[in-house]
Amino acid sequence: MTSFLGALPDGFMQHLLGGVGINFWIATVAVVLGLAAGLPLAYGLAAGPRWLRWLAAPPVALMRAVPTFVIMFFLYQILDSGGAPGTSPISPRMMVAWALMPYAAAFIADSGADALRHWREGSRTAALLLLPNLVRAYFVMVMSSGISAAIGVQDGISIILQQANAMGSFAQQLGVYLLGILVFGAILQIGLLAVNRLRRLLVRLAEVPAAGQGA
């Protein structure tokens, strides 16, 4: 263990955590873009007139089906490969955020439409479960943003792969991969904990008015 840690360059963990921060940045931007596109579609699916539901359903179905990896490489080929390196109008990490946007928008449209239907039916607790579901989707996108390594973004996955390739033995390479699994596994567990805590909080808040009315 000591030899493995000694083989890592100075400041590697800070470098790795900085790369993980890029994964969070990409997921955050993707959620913001997804909210902008998904909330109007959610209204169209659940609360709008019939003709609006007919208009909203096809783009949501398309966004559910489109592969994120394909969108990312399409944007990369169109925006980055046509000119000199670094002349793209948007950064590679922003390309990844846009590639994740259809997943985020489709999830928000579907979950938001369900929440609106539950709210209209008087099921406030079921409607508010949109919030923990959105937190869960956010952490899924944090993990999915690792595809950005394929186009050269220095995120957490890219840093792990580069460091593993630089190690002198298979055992050291395996140690780097295991370290990456621990870091991203911890992120996933934090996300699951946040989802469960938020769900329990919403259930408790929903039970308080009911208890008050019973008294």
Image (cartoon, rainbow, N blue to C red):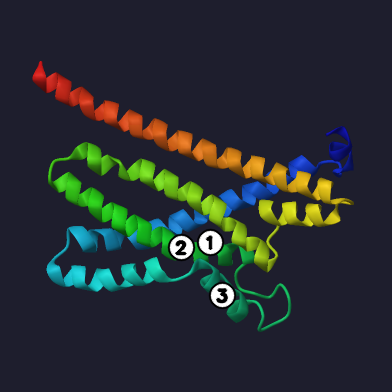
Categorize mark 1 by other alpha carbons within 10 Å: few (<14), some (14-19), many (20+).
many
Q: Which residue is mark 1?
A: 97
Q: Which residue is mark 2?
A: 101
Element type at mark 3: helix
Question: In the rendered image, is residue 155 in sight?
Answer: no
Q: Which residue is mark 3?
A: 75
**Dot 3 or dot 1, earlier in sequence:** 3
The answer to whether residue 130 is left or right of residue 124 is: right
Q: Note whether 201 is above or below 151 in the view shown.
A: above
Q: Note whether 189 is above or below 103 in the view shown.
A: above
Q: Residue 204: percent from the left, percent from the top?
A: 28, 26
Q: Quadrant of the C terminus?
A: top left
Element type at mark 1: helix
Q: CA distance from mark 2 to mark 3?
A: 13 Å
Amino acid under disc 2: Met
Question: In the rendered image, is residue 92 in sight?
Answer: yes
Categorize mark 2 by other alpha carbons within 10 Å: few (<14), some (14-19), many (20+).
many
The answer to whether residue 193 is left or right of residue 84 is: left
Q: Are marks 3 and 1 in contact (CB under 8 Å)?
A: no
Q: Residue at x 73, y 80 (%)?
A: 84
Q: Residue 99: percent from the left, percent from the top?
A: 51, 66
Amino acid under disc 1: Ala
The answer to whether residue 85 is left or right of residue 189 is: right
Q: Residue at x 24, y 48 (%)?
A: 115
Q: Are marks 1 and 2 in contact (CB under 8 Å)?
A: yes
